[in-house]
Image (cartoon, rainbow, N blue to C red):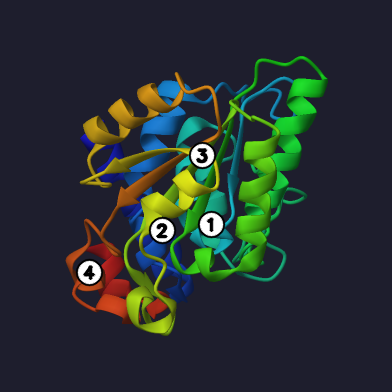
Amino acid sequence: MNDFCKCIRKDIVFQIGNFGVGHLGGSLSITELLVVLYKNYIRFDVKNPKKPDRDRLIVSKGHSGPAIYAILCNLGFFGREWLKTLNKPGTNLPSHCDMNKTPGIDMTTGSLGQGLSCAVGIAIAAKLCKYDSKIYAIVGDGELQEGQIWEAAMFAAHQKLDNLILFIDYNKMQIDGMVSEICNIEPLAKKWLAFGWETIEVTNGNSCSEINDAIKKANEKTSPCAVILNTIKGFGVSFARDLGIDNHSMSVSREQYEN
């Protein structure tokens, strides 16, 4: 699985390097999560990506599109030639995920704070349709400063949505600085517990084995579950990781992505 993560990282860097600039840090920090989800948990059909009773993944931090595109490509949703078109005119791989352009994208996202509300609605719809679908959502830590997140959290707990698992990419950084300095979200686990969610903390959010163990536990819960992943922004690519908060959106040279 670690080899597949390296493959996904190379394709993330390739896409952004081919265009010249893009959201690298936050794409790299969720690579392991995406690999574990798609390899071990998410039920999907490449030939029928709109299958009604499929599991769904809503990546609320839609600027992490390059990571989603890399794994969808490697799973066969579209050809590798598309990876060369990231953010370019007429592309099917826009800067933020768009369900109307890219096969395998379950919800158009990027307006931070809104993705969890969409996931809650989809989870309710799955129950109404009597599907056994699991609804997975990913949010950024800076995104938790949005009030809409907590409205959705309150409603999900009230509805007892045990088919909903939320992953928090807790890399401690947002576009303008450290989350703790801009608007501290701690105590994070206690907040989710107070809103009626089961809560699991993952010490190393870039460890496939720790992520896998957390998802196993989350799938056994009888309430919506928040999995807090302590990740590193830019993980796995030294020139991105070393930039710290400046890797949110950054330039990537031809030399960097070719090496």
Q: Would you say 252 lies left or right of 183 here?
A: left
Q: Nearer the viewer, mark 3 or mark 1?
A: 3
Q: Would you say 231 lies left or right of 169 here?
A: left
First reached walking from the N terminus: tag 2 or tag 4: 2
Give the position of the N terminus as an image quadrant.
top left
Q: Residue at 65% across / 43% down in the picture?
A: 105
Mark 1 belongs to which amino acid? Gly
Where's residue 255, x and y in %? 25, 73
Mark 4 belongs to which amino acid? Arg
Q: Is residue 86 above or below residue 123?
A: below
Residue on which the image places disc 1:
65
Q: Nearer the viewer, mark 4 or mark 3?
A: 3
State yes or no: discs 1 and 2 in contact (Cβ < 8 Å): yes
Residue on which the image places disc 3:
197
Circle number at residue 76:
none
Foreground pick, 194 / 172: 194
Cα–Cα gap, marks 3 and 1:
27 Å
Q: Residues within 10 Å of mark 4 (few under 14, many from 20)?
A: some
First reached walking from the N terminus: tag 4 or tag 3: 3
Q: Would you say 161 lies left or right of 35 here?
A: right
Where's residue 34, x and y in %? 42, 40
Q: Residue at 22% across / 62% down in the picture?
A: 237
Q: Is residue 110 above or below residue 152?
A: below
Q: Secondary structure at mark 3?
A: loop
First reached walking from the N terminus: tag 1 or tag 2: 2
Cα–Cα gap, marks 2 and 4:
12 Å
Q: Residues within 10 Å of mark 1 (few under 14, many from 20)?
A: many
Circle number at residue 27:
2
How many marks the image carries: the answer is 4
First reached walking from the N terminus: tag 4 or tag 1: 1
